[in-house]
Image (tube, helix red, strand yellow):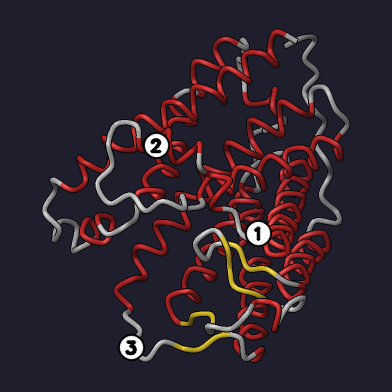
Amino acid sequence: MRSFGKILFYAFFVLLGGALAAPQAWLLIQQLPPDLLHGLVGEVQKMPFHRYLSRSIQVASILLLVPLLISLHVRSLEEFGLFWNNRKLHDFFIGLATGILAALLLVAALFFSGAFEIHANWNPSVLPRILVTAIVVSMLEEFLFRGVILGFLRQSLCRWIAIVCSALIFAGVHFLNLPSSAAITVPTWSSGLSSLVSLREGLPPWPIFLWTFATLLLAGIILGWMTTRTGSLWAPIGLHGSWVFIQQLFNSIATYRHLPPELFLPYVGPAQCHGAVPIGLEALIALLLAGALAAIFMRHRPCPRLYNRTSW
């Protein structure tokens, strides 16, 4: 019970630290030359404040993770069900291949749905930024959600309940990336806090919210299953990274037509969470296909035992 309280304190200080750091990060980035790193800094400078808030919270979650693990007396990643993997490249490419295949089939379905239109002038210079985003997001989120959170839950819950609970947390946290209804052009020290307070105002309508939550929940369940099946994060990183890369690439090539979402739902709708989360039955079917393919490729893979820790 004391360990659960420590995790609640950790979550509180992650949100508080990220909210206070976001305005400072925005001011720091604005002072850099826009052409630095071949114009990448200039692209970051154009991002709205809520993107800085989201990234600051993610950085705070990693930095504060070290004192949390020390306070929980965690000595090895094996206590989270993560083991040395001699087949890491094999697992990574399974995740990568299944993610690419399912995402490409989804992209083809989105093109033929008539809900999207192709941009007239596509700029290939966005590829390095998309690739970096896919690598950083997949590694950071998999370590946090499937490594630490899922591993902790598995010590007190059965495997599938722990997977579902971690997926629920994974889905809920993504809505911290929604913009505040009030546009912030020049943030002050309290802008991050005010954005968190007004977060509910930026939520999409309930039908869109439920479709978005369903996509994130199913993705979290599949990624959690891959983690427990292999005892490592290589397979989910491959699947997560490939999905993010192709989805962001699709967003740079096409955009949702200015039509009511109800016109195409339940089959497809406008991607949510800044284009990172496709919604509709087509997205859910693509995720199920990725999970089914991964299950076929891993059907002979022995499931590692969970490290038994006497107390937290």
The quarter of the displayed image where residue 86 is located: top right
Tag nearer the camera, 3 or 2: 2
Image quadrant occupied by the N terminus: top right
Instruction: Read off the residue under disc 1.
Output: 95
In the rendered view, tell whether residue 154 sits above or below residue 185.
Answer: above
Specify few, some or many for label 2: CA neighbours under 10 Å numbering under 14, 14-19, or 20 or more.
Answer: many
Q: Is residue 183 left or right of residue 271?
A: left
Q: Is 5 above or below relative to 262?
A: above
Label 1 secondary element: helix
Which of disc 2 and disc 3 is earlier in sequence? Answer: 3
Q: Where residue 307 sits in the image (x, y, percent)?
A: 77, 23
**Label 2: which residue?**
192
- State which mark lies toward you, 2 or 1: 2
273 or 90, which is in the foreground? 273
Question: Would you identify the image quadrant in which residue 127 lies?
Answer: bottom left
Question: Secondary structure under badge 2?
Answer: helix
In this picture, residue 53 sits left or right of residue 220: left
Nearer the observer: mark 1 or 3; the answer is 3
Structural distance between the alpha carbons of marks 1 and 3: 32 Å
| Mark toward the start of the polypeptide (1 vs 3) | 1
Q: Say which residue appears at 49% left-offset and 27% top-offset.
A: 14
Q: Nearer the viewer, residue 98 or 28?
A: 28
Q: Are marks 2 and 1 in contact (CB under 8 Å)?
A: no
Judged left or right of residue 23, residue 167 is right
**Label 3 close to label 2 by CB (< 8 Å):** no
Q: Which residue is mark 3?
A: 121
Crowding near the residue tagged with mark 1, few <14, some 14–19, many ≥20 C-alpha atoms within 10 Å: many
The residue lying at 67 percent from left, 33 percent from top is: 82
Q: CA distance from mark 2 to mark 1?
A: 35 Å
Q: CA distance from mark 3 to mark 2?
A: 35 Å
Quadrant position of the C terminus in the picture: top right
